[in-house]
Image (cartoon, helix red, strand yellow):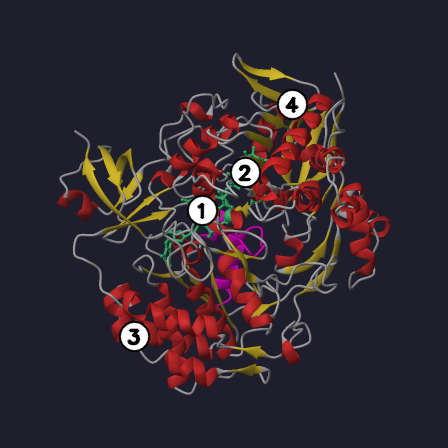
Amino acid sequence: MTEAITRLGRCTLCEAMCGLRVTTSGNRIVGIRGDEDDSLSAGHICPKALALADLRDDPDRLRSPVRRTEDGWRDISWEEAFDLVAERFARLRRRHGADSVAVYLGNPVTHSLGAMTHAPAFADLLGTRNRFSASSVDQLPHQVVARLLYGNQWLLPVPDVDRTAYFLVFGANPAVSNGSLMTAPGMGRRIRALLARGGTMVLFDPRRTETARLGAEHHFVRPGTDAALILAMVRVILDEGLARPAAYIDGLDEVRDVLAPFEPERAEAAAGVEPGTVRRVAREFATAPAAACYGRMGVSTQRFGTLCQWGIQLLNIVTGNLDRPGGTLLTRPAVDPIRTRQIDPGHQGRWRSRVRGLPEFGGELPVATLAEEIRTPGPGQVRGLLTVAGNPVSSTPGGPALDEALAGLDFMACVDFYVNETTRHADVILPPTEPLERDHYDLIFHMLAVRNTARYVPAVFPKPPGARHDWEIFRELGRRYGRFLRSRAWRAALMLRMPPERIVDLGLRTGPYRLSLKKLRRSPQGADFGELRPSLPRRLQTPRRRVHAAPPSLVAAAEEAVSELLEPPEPGALLLVGRRQLRGNNSWMHNSGRLVKGRARHHLLMNPGDMAARGLGEGDLVSVRSPAGVLTVEASASQDMMPGTVSLPHGYGHALPGVRLSVARRLPGSSVNALTDPASLDQVSGTAVLNGVPVTVERCR
Ligand SMILES: Nc1nc2c(c(=O)[nH]1)N[C@H]1C(S)=C(S)[C@@H](COP(=O)(O)OP(=O)(O)OC[C@H]3O[C@@H](n4cnc5c(=O)[nH]c(N)nc54)[C@H](O)[C@@H]3O)O[C@H]1N2
Ligand SMILES: Nc1nc2c(c(=O)[nH]1)N[C@H]1C(S)=C(S)[C@@H](COP(=O)(O)OP(=O)(O)OC[C@H]3O[C@@H](n4cnc5c(=O)[nH]c(N)nc54)[C@H](O)[C@@H]3O)O[C@H]1N2
Ligand code: SF4
Ligand SMILES: [Mo]
């Protein structure tokens, strides 16, 4: 019997960065609870933290490299795997040019320190313009707007939830997601505290969500129309003389001009929100002692995602709530690559995708175009693919078409520890250590948190013999691939040789608190630098440190959008939206028995009236059809759905041939991304439209 030991850890499954106390016995986890002393999470955890034990023990999780052969997967040595990947990518480059190998970086890259520091460096070494990531099915509109308004794509003001008096939210469900681009573990508790101190939360969402149920004032909004609503609110505030912008704001006259068509009465026909509500909320927001407006997936991954995010920034800007305590503020992270200008401030249109001519942003192309880049022959065709911590077959629009395209690649390698819907096509899979086996410092989410904190979390378990961390995989791939290059990419090669803790140490030393890794390690619970503080205009990276509120590209986009945006819906039409779930994590935690147990959660939620109109009963199998595809799923009545809208969660549909997820495979449900359309993008940013997808629903015969 080994003695039980409790160690401090951190959950890296979502953006909340909850502090953990992990009790171990030898190599096993015997208990996980929240760490009450963590200054950010204060003991909070959600059910997913406990599933870290399932992830650790999961017999389906790969522990060493595998190669696909005609008789199935064969274990191979790391040496063989590294040589094979380096050689095959080099060969493609030699024959067809660097762009013939594409890279896709998935969401957990941001949650693994070593993937964060080393995967982009290896992609640099590959030198391809066909770079993709989960950003273009996620937060890209925020980055586009931040670059245009504040001069850097990562200058993302965070809502000061703990001090605000008025929290206005569009298309986010933080009670389930625990916040995104707003690291605030325990969002339920924080929202209840806001209401308890007499504050207000107003939520616009086509579903009455778990967040609405915490006591927020909730309004239905027709999917895809928020921009009309948000811009109408800005207009009301400007018209009624309620604007109080800071001295460094320019361009509000141009904003006023472009907003002329956005009358609350016209917005009503499209969005289904009463003009009286729009006016009242706008006035309350403008006159509250401190107010913060925030919007996430529902208003990012929709047809006017960038206009929505512009409108949200404008609401904060015109009311003087940008950079005000209780409004929205920038963090001051201990490692601050924005300040030291080590991070790309963002650029757009330096090159375009080959087939559809879509502009890059910040060096990446919209992932909605990946399948056609693989399928379309000709010079520059994508023939090889590296995916890192991603599952684009499940998570990107037109997943089934991408699935087919992947089968036609010359060579595919994946850095991942599961054989999932995507990696089943790989020639080689290189599995990294699991999250509790490695040290962690959060380079991204400290930058987006509601408090300034810094924490270095040593691994809970030692690295198993023979295992490799994400960064070690890329360092080794880089070393071998580099031998094939005629000219050396020095910067990338140098970066690949540096261990992540060195990079963190350097970042801390050059950061605003002049820390070092040694100093930070002395406080195992982390350092707390307190609440967010005003820092504008000093931190702006725009010319003359001023904010031009009406960037020409956004003005043009708003003008162009007017007729489509203000168009009333066709009677009887249905629009599909997404739904995140507390017991799931995008496409990849469904193999945890303890998360998926209990009732099924994959149903299509529909308003009872819409079901009756189609003669549907509870649990009926229906076929859902969009311009892009069709799927079958059980329907379930929900009074929480706005009439004319239906909701499906993403990340289901695991039962494809070869997928090695024995628990997940047994789950019913289909991939919603069979319905989302790779042709349908937010024009400004290239972000996929995942919400507000037109569908028809009928009973399966
Ligand atoms: N438990 C859990 N937590 C997670 C994740 C997870 O998979 N599971 N994923 C993490 C990730 S990667 C992210 S990016 C975050 C996302 O965090 P959130 O954005 O907070 O999460 P979603 O559930 O996608 O919330 C989107 C909401 O928008 C609504 N919506 C859809 N269309 C529209 C629209 O047109 N207008 C408006 N106003 N609303 C609309 C939907 O009904 C939904 O309630 O969550 C993170 N946290
Ligand atoms: N319809 C629809 N589609 C969506 C969304 C939606 O709301 N609706 N949400 C979108 C959003 S916000 C996101 S972020 C994306 C997510 O989409 P992706 O990033 O493409 O996929 P994930 O489901 O996060 O899959 C993560 C993969 O990373 C692996 N992994 C986990 N940890 C590690 C690690 O430490 N190292 C390595 N190397 N691999 C690891 C897992 O095994 C899994 O295979 O989905 C998007 N797709
Ligand atoms: S909210 Fe849940 S998944 Fe997210 S970090 Fe905390 S415990 Fe992990
Ligand atoms: Mo995401």
Question: What separation in Å lies between label 2 and label 1 (alpha carbons)?
Answer: 16 Å
* Residue underneath mark 4: 65
* Residue 676 percent location from the top left of the image: 36, 45
Q: Amino acid at mark 2?
A: Gly
What numbered label is drawn on residue 531? none
Disc 3 target residue: 264
Q: CA distance from mark 3 to mark 1?
A: 36 Å
Quadrant for the C terminus in the image: top left
Q: Amino acid at mark 4?
A: Pro
- Which residue is disc 1 drawn over? 369
Residue mark closest to the camera, 3 vs 1: 1
| Occupied quadrant, residue 336 | bottom right
**x 47%, y 57%: residue:** 296
Q: Residues within 10 Å of mark 3 (few under 14, many from 20)?
A: many
Marked residue nearer the N-terminal end (2 or 1): 1
Residue assigned mark 2: 390
